[in-house]
Image (tube, rainbow, N blue to C red):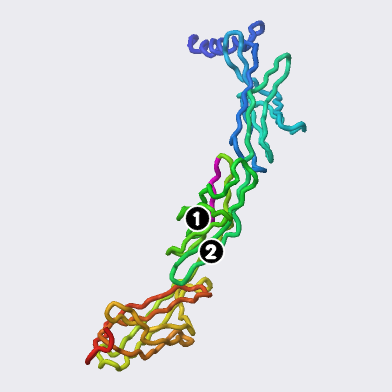
Amino acid sequence: MTLRRSLPVLTALTCGLGVLPGLPARAAAPPVEAVLTLFADPKAIAAGGEVRLSGTLQGRTEAGDVIPIPGEAIEIDNLNTVEDDGLDALTRTDGSYSVTASLRETGTFRARFEADGQKADSPRVQVRVLATAVLHDFGVSYSPSRRFKATGRLTLSAGPNDDPTRIDVSLQYSPDGRRGWRTVTRTRPDAHRGLRFGPFTHAPGWWRLRFPGDEHYAPATSTVRKAWRWKTSFDALTFTPRRIKVGKKITVSGVLYRTGAKRKGRFPYARQKVAVIFLCGKTWRVAAKGRTDAKGRFKIKAGTWCDARYQVVFDGTAKGDTLRAYSKSAKIDTLGRPTLN
């Protein structure tokens, strides 16, 4: 029992040795030389862009150890200007510091430290302000047959190389205009700074022009343009009769539908022109034309000239917002001598 009671006393005495009077804690050796670093990220920015200037303040002791120097003021100067930029920072517990600067012209920076007889200058760091590239006058067109075209212009500010014909500009597509941007094709401006893309077939969506930047010019992105048309389709189609004497007329009927932003699902497409076409030999021809009623319905009499496949087509609206649509085809057999091959 006596030994068990004496253990806490012994422990307390042992733990308290570090704070007994006359036994001061061991202090770290003071630094004899201060070392200051400075880094810039990024090292090239657009005019008005921001750069992060950061570094560390450390000291070397007589024993050769490297220790951080916290709580000291660091003054950062832009050597390309005569004005005081006010870029001051305070070192953290690990000796690090950082500030953010906005530049409109190329700058060369140096960090300085001076206190208690110690002083240090960092190496100089240059941050380049890139020349400006502007993508403008961007326009798109999208036909009912899903054919896409785009035009635009590239303007370069005065820079080391102001020849726009050497720069690759990307045409990018996104299905929703917010994410998933991908490059569809690239081109270079002509001598008049003009850009032309297409025509080519593509799904509806959102488009933009993009220049990723290079060693002379900052990146540039155009405004986003929407090239969109709504799907159309046929339903309830009938072709009667399926066997008929050459020269007689068949009846083609059905309903034209469309989709749109203001209504969910498809709905009848009223008062639109449709055509009945047929394939005789290797050539498609127009057999008859008609128009849908207020409920999207149509009923058209179409002539016959030979054994042929018949189909209904809606060409879309050139100045509207709908795509072209084709119906399923139906085989019509004719009796008698064909009048077309």
Position in image of residue 146 (x %, y %): 44, 68
Do we see residue 330 in this rendering? no
> Is 323 located above or below residue 63 in the figure?
below
- Which structural element holds mark 1? strand
Residue denoted by label 1: 171
Judge from the rendering whether residue 7 lies leftward or rightward of residue 275; answer left or right.
Answer: right
Position in image of residue 212 (x %, y %): 53, 46
201 or 17: which is nearer to us? 201
Position in image of residue 6 (x %, y %): 52, 10
The C terminus - image quarter: bottom left
Q: Residue furthest right?
A: 83
Q: Which mark is residue 211?
A: none
Q: Residue furthest front?
A: 191
Q: Residue at x 46, y 85 (%)?
A: 295
Q: CA distance from mark 2 to mark 1?
A: 11 Å
Q: Residue at x 61, y 40 (%)?
A: 160
Q: Quadrant of residue 313?
A: bottom left
Rate crowding at label 1 as few (under 14), some (14 to 19) or many (20 or more) other CA atoms within 10 Å: many
Q: Residue at x 58, y 8 (%)?
A: 63
Residue denoted by label 2: 140
48 or 215: which is nearer to us? 215
Indicate which disc, 2 or 1, sits on the residue closer to the N terminus. Answer: 2
> Is 239 located above or below residue 321 in the figure?
below
Q: Quadrant of residue 218?
A: top right
Which residues lie in the magenta part? 208-214
- Which structural element holds mark 2? strand
Contact between labelled residues 1 and 2, with CB atoms less than 8 Å apart: no
Do we see residue 15 in this rendering? yes
